[in-house]
Image: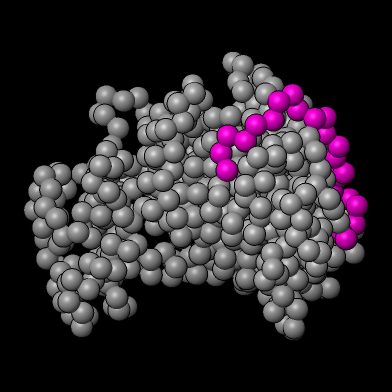
């Protein structure tokens, strides 16, 4: 490996993706932007990536907008397809540029991608650009997710371009520097299966296995093992989302990674009141990606992944279908195991007992009935506090609580020990939509302080300084319902 030079800001690129057949990407040369300026730099992440943080902050803006290229940059947009709300389309990076795969000293590989950098051959009618607000939103929420221990792409920087972008209004253009263990998606495999030959599909699959699951290369049927592994990671990921009340909003197959990281923070949002039907996205008119549907939709996406892999799973089509079918049938039980194990922890139930799942479901039904806030209810339970919320006053809850306390007393731990575990997994703060929107709005108008404070609070969600109590507050009763928009 080359020695570190300030010139490259500590980036060491080794672009393994370029070894795939050319149909998997397009080289992109962008026009320099008007006036690049770094507005936000994730210094902690930059240090973890062994970058030259100060130099990057001082001189990195042209690099982080795609106006200048680093040495050994890949400079590509990736090809992929995907089912968008159930409809299959050819897609690809229409507004993202992979500048390279950065490899750290301990040989960990990260895609460094510029989201909103400009047009690519996959842009179709789009301008390839992004507005500042949504890029700030992705930065904030992805970093909050990371702090909540959910696998996710990270955000290294938000850089403005100095150029206007045109939507229903004129906005300031910005580029998000996204860091991911890769950008391989279910949609990448759908693209290979639909538009490339079997050799290309095989190369892609071997590449993905080597990059994310190298131990599977020894398996008897490595493509089936690959399907099982991706299924497992996705089941674990969606369980994580459900456990914290996160609604992705656009779980199209192009937004499902092979690594099991959450990707693409467009219309996503966190649920306040527990309600399985919660949808925030303006474009999800059929509630396809409602909170309660997410596990089922992940299973549907995995089935599309399995279909793409069929030619590799077995030479005999019927045999391949049978093997794939047997695997994807396990999705819901694997998901449920992750989910209920997580809920057990959230309720301080540290052993596995037959009645646990019913106890979890009953509490959730009470939250739904009393329109209780999901996060705050679990946190109040974790702190063994009394509050005057309707749910806690109800005889039904008191009856549930007695059974729960009895359940805990029978597991050989003290209540105090159970509460300790609960406090370590039930966040005090989540990105509340009304607070996120206000912080972004204020930032865009020029005052960055509220955004920076919210970011700091969300980076440590299991602890709260007394002066930050306001971040646990719900929107006012008379506030209009929150709606999120994507593609902006
Ligand atoms: P998303 O909903 O963000 O996952 O995007 C779906 C597809 O639309 C992807 O292929 C994106 O690259 C593309 N896309 C989104 N916004 C734009 C834009 N402003 N210009 C060009 N392509 C875009
Ligand atoms: Mg996407």
Judged left or right of residue 60, residue 141 is: left
x and y percentages locating residue 105 in the rendered image: 69, 68
Whether residue 292 is visible, yes or no, is no
Q: Is residue 448 above or below residue 108?
A: above
Q: Is residue 437 above or below residue 345?
A: above
Q: Residue furthest top?
A: 169
Q: Residue at x 78, y 63 (%)?
A: 3
Q: Quadrant of residue 203?
A: bottom right
Residue 131 in sight = yes
Q: Which residues are magenta?
A: 19-41
Q: Position of residue 183 (x, y in %)?
A: 70, 53
Q: Residue at x 29, y 75 (%)?
A: 350
Question: Is 340 on the left or on the right of 156, as rendered?
Answer: left
Give x and y (percent) for residue 155: 58, 47
Which quadrant is the C terminus positioned in? top right
* Relative to 162, residue 341 above or below: below
Q: Observer-nearest residue: 36 or 474?
A: 36
Q: Is residue 243 above or below residue 281?
A: below
Q: Which residue is more in the foreground, 23 or 434?
A: 434
Location of the N terminus by quadrant is bottom right
In depth, the one of 431 and 365 nearer the eye is 431
Q: How many marks?
A: 0
Q: Residue at x 25, y 68 (%)?
A: 420
Residue at image location 57% in from the left, 43% down from the top: 41
Residue 139 located within the stretch drawn in magenta: no
Give coordinates of residue 58: x percent, y percent: 65, 40
């Amino acid at each position: 490996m080359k020695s570190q030079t300030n010139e490259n800001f500590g980036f060491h690129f080794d672009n393994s993706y370029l070894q795939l057949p050319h149909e998997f990407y397009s080289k992109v040369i962008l026009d320099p932007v008007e006036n690049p300026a770094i507005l936000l730099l994730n210094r902690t992440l930059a240090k973890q990536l062994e970058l030259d943080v100060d130099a990057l902050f001082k001189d990195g803006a042209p690099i982080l907008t795609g106006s200048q290229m680093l040495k050994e940059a890949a400079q590509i947009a990736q090809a992929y397809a995907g089912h968008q709300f159930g409809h299959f389309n050819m897609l690809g990076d229409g507004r993202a540029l992979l500048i390279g795969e950065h490899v750290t000293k301990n040989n960990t590989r990260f895609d460094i991608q510029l989201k909103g950098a400009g047009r690519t051959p996959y842009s179709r009618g789009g301008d390839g650009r992004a507005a500042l607000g949504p890029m700030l939103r992705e930065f904030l929420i992805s970093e909050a997710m990371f702090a909540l221990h959910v696998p996710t792409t990270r955000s290294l920087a938000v850089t403005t371009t100095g150029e206007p972008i045109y939507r229903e209004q004129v906005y300031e253009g910005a580029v998000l520097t996204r860091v991911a263990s890769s950008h391989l998606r279910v949609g990448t495999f759908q693209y290979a299966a639909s538009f490339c030959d079997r050799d290309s599909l095989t190369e892609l699959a071997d590449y993905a296995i080597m990059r994310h699951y190298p131990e599977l290369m020894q398996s008897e049927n490595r493509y089936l093992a690959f399907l099982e592994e991706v299924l497992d990671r996705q089941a674990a990921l969606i369980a994580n989302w459900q456990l914290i009340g996160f609604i992705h909003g656009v779980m199209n197959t192009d937004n499902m990674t092979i690594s099991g990281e959450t990707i693409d923070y467009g219309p996503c949002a966190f649920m306040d009141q527990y309600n399985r039907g919660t949808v925030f996205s303006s474009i999800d008119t059929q509630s396809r990606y409602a909170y309660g549907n997410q596990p089922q939709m992940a299973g549907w996406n995995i089935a599309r992944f399995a279909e793409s892999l069929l030619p590799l799973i077995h030479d005999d089509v019927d045999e391949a279908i049978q093997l794939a079918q047997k695997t994807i049938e396990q999705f819901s039980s694997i998901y449920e195991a992750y989910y209920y194990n997580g809920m057990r922890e959230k309720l301080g139930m540290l052993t596995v007992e037959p009645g646990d799942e019913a106890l979890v479901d009953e509490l959730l039904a009470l939250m739904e009935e009393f329109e209780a806030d999901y996060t705050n209810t679990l946190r109040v339970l974790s702190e063994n506090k009394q509050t005057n919320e309707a749910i806690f006053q109800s005889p039904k809850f008191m009856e549930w609580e007695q059974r729960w306390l009895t359940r805990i007393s029978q597991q050989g731990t003290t209540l105090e020990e159970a509460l300790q575990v609960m406090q370590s997994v039930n966040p005090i703060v989540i990105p509340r939509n009304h607070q996120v929107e206000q912080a972004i709005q204020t930032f865009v108008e020029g005052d960055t302080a509220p955004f920076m404070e919210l970011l700091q609070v969300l980076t440590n969600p299991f602890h709260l300084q007394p002066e930050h109590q306001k971040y646990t507050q719900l929107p006012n009763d008379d506030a209009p319902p929150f709606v999120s928009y994507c593609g902006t």
